[in-house]
Image (cartoon, rainbow, N blue to C red):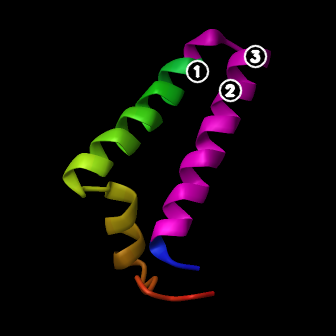
Amino acid sequence: MSIDRIVLAVAGSFILISLLLAHFHSPHWLWFTGFVGANLLQSAFTGFCPMAILLKKLGVKPGCAF
């Protein structure tokens, strides 16, 4: 799995988990959903993604197919 796909999978998971937490626990979890969305948006324009940097440091290859 490539770094891009891992980042998208993690971001999607965070969004779904925070929505569930907002529904069942506290609506304040929607702030986390907004943070993830804002981070995805700024990453699209700037190319800076902290998760991608972390994955590179962990040794995930950028062009890895599977």
Q: CA distance from mark 1 to mark 3?
A: 9 Å
Pointer 3: residues within 10 angstroms few (<14), some, or many (20+)?
A: few
Residue under numbered circle 3: 23
Residue for point 32% across, 56% down: 50
- Main secondary structure type of the part rendered in magenta: helix
Q: Nearer the viewer, residue 50 or 63?
A: 63
Residue 55 image point, x, y percent? 42, 71
Secondary structure of the residue carrying numbered label 1: helix
Mark-to-mark CA distance, 3 and 2 = 6 Å
At which x and y percent is residue 9? 61, 57
Query: Does the magenta segment cover residue 55?
Result: no
Q: Is disc 3 in contact with disc 2, using a CB cutoff of under 8 Å?
A: yes
The mark nearer the N terminus, 2 or 1, is 2
Tell me the kind of residue under disc 1. Trp
* Residue type at the position of mark 3: His
- The quadrant the N terminus occupies is bottom right
* Image quarter hosting the C terminus: bottom right
Q: Which residues are magenta?
A: 4-28
Task: Write down the residue under mark 1.
Answer: 29
Along the line of sight, which residue is nearer the eye, 62 or 56? Answer: 62
Q: Are marks 2 and 1 in contact (CB under 8 Å)?
A: yes
Relative vertical location of residue 58 with respect to residue 15 in this rendering, above or below: below
Badge 2 is on which residue? 19
The amino acid pointed to by label 2 is Leu
The picture quadrant where one finds residue 40 is top left
Q: Is residue 20 magenta?
A: yes
Q: Position of residue 7 (x, y in %)?
A: 49, 60
What residue is at 40 percent from the left and 59 percent from the top? 51
